[in-house]
Image (cartoon, helix red, strand yellow):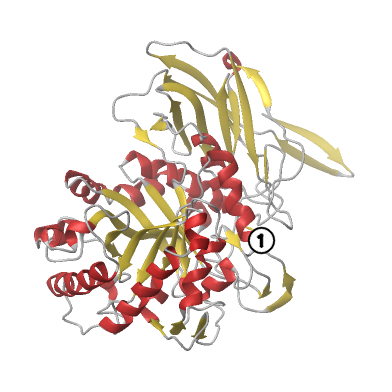
Amino acid sequence: MSRFMMWGAHLIMLVAPIVSAIEVTIPLTAPSGAASLMGNLVSLSIEQDRWTDWAGTTEPNTFFNNVLDNFVQITNTPPFVRIGADSEDHTDFSYDVEYEEDIFPASTAITPYPEATNITVGQGFYDIISHLPNGTQVHWGVNLREYNLTAAYLETVALMNAFSSPAVVEKNITLKFIEVGNEADLYRNNKGRNSSWNVQEYVSEWEEFAYNVSITANLSDSSYTKLIGAAFAESSHNNLSGFSPQAIFNLGILESPAGQLVETISQHHYSGSFCTGGGAVLQDLMTKSYIRGNVSEFSSDVEATLAKGLNYILGETNSMSCHGAPNVSNTAGAALWLLDYTLYATQVGISRIHFHEGIGYKYNLIQPVTLNYSILDGSPITPQAPHIQPAYYAAIIAAEAIGSSGTAQAVEITIDENDVSGYAIFEHGTLSKAVFINTIAYFAGAGARNSTHIDLCFTGSGHAAKKMSVKTLKIGYATDTNNVTWGGQTYETSDGRVSGPLTVDVLPVSSGIDLQETEAILVTFL
């Protein structure tokens, strides 16, 4: 509908928002095969070259601990923390170093905060794991790329010393996984190996190094700590001549002494790239079909992994590789991408998602220290105190959807719309909540903001709620980098804690819900 008004001598047409209407059907009880959701579904992968900034050295990083503890308050579970990534394969150990000494390349406009090319660490580097919240599970990487058994041995000894220390044991912070090598499939591209490097050579080397690591760490069938498998950057899927879970299974890695200690396969994945400084479009990232394509390409890998009785995780992932794209990865629109990406990943059998973080990276959920240079182009800025970025809200929403019961399950709601996603959440087998996401990017100057009205119907046996609470992620524009609110509250605070009065609408279920462009809502059935 349009109407006209006079402004001076000019006739102006005002365009009213378009409201489309859809009806969705939600099961009242969890269908067979509904995905189980762990409280640490959204977890972190941290570039280890500046691990000391995240954890703190002589005392804990209070801001980082607070933003982790926010999840504990919601799910009773801290995020799982993976430490390693590219810099794990550039790390050596020295008894002469207290924490770490790094050598960094020059900053560039594309990569304002580059990864260190050389990291030398001491025992203190590992000991500060004691600064994390009680009950944190950890997945830590050791160096394979340099083909130095001594380095891998010394790092493993330091790891086990740290995790057996009274300060760590008292807080029940545990080393769940050791990862031997990061993205070994790329060694032939990054000069880690020669151009003929292949999966057969990888399996042979991994078995050698992982066996030595396992003996050093005293790992066994009955030990709590196990090994991570794969950790590849890409996957050849069912092409057994390339790097994939199927390929290493076919080569017998799981039958090797070290391979018998693998209980989880880790895959790395980014939804696009900014490594050459272009090609990133926010609406593309947010698009429902794009998200599903990025996740479902690993379906055959997941199926092969689960068939071996192993778990499958995304051990390192985020929006755009090479630390994210400016005005895409750091925006509120990326929060909607993260929420839909996370929940959809559960539907193909992915049990945990570790979003990669590094100091000053554009795609971070969390910036844990003061930044003096722009994350967008490296230019000097007024010092910016530790803060969360919009994607953090998506992690909070996922946590609230999962809750603390330990019984959460999810199924995707069938919605015949290109830009609306939905997920039903069950607790104790009964419908509890639903998440709806509108993935149309609403930009400044776009005119009227359209919305979709969703009427809710139910199927199956059980009691259908008459009332519901509706909590909304409010975003001005998809490109916003701050002033986002969740239920009227903000996490954009100096201490990382939630602030402000909670705003939740309680409505009859029969009234349905309205979902604007660039918006997400959590429905709780009362």
Residue found 39% across the figure and 19% down from its top: 29
Say which quadrant the C terminus sits in.
top right
User: In the rendered structure, which amino acid carries the disc numbered 1?
Assistant: Thr
Answer above or below: position of 496 versus 521.
below
Q: Residue at x 9, y 63 (%)?
A: 251
Image quarter of residue 225:
bottom left
For the point 52% across and 54% down, which residue is it? Answer: 171
Q: Residues within 10 Å of mark 1 (few under 14, many from 20)?
A: some
**Residue 145 located left or right of residue 359:** left
Question: Which residue is nearer to you in this view: 127 or 387?
Answer: 127
- Residue 139: image quadrant is bottom left
Considering only vertical position in the picture, is 332 above or below 208? above
Relative side of 170 to 29, left or right: right
Q: Which residue is mark 1?
A: 62
In this view of the protein, can residue 479 be seen by the observer?
no
The answer to which of 494 and 7 lies nearer the viewer is 494
Dot 1: element: helix
Q: Nearer the viewer, residue 462 or 208?
A: 208
Q: Position of residue 355 (x, y in %)?
A: 46, 57
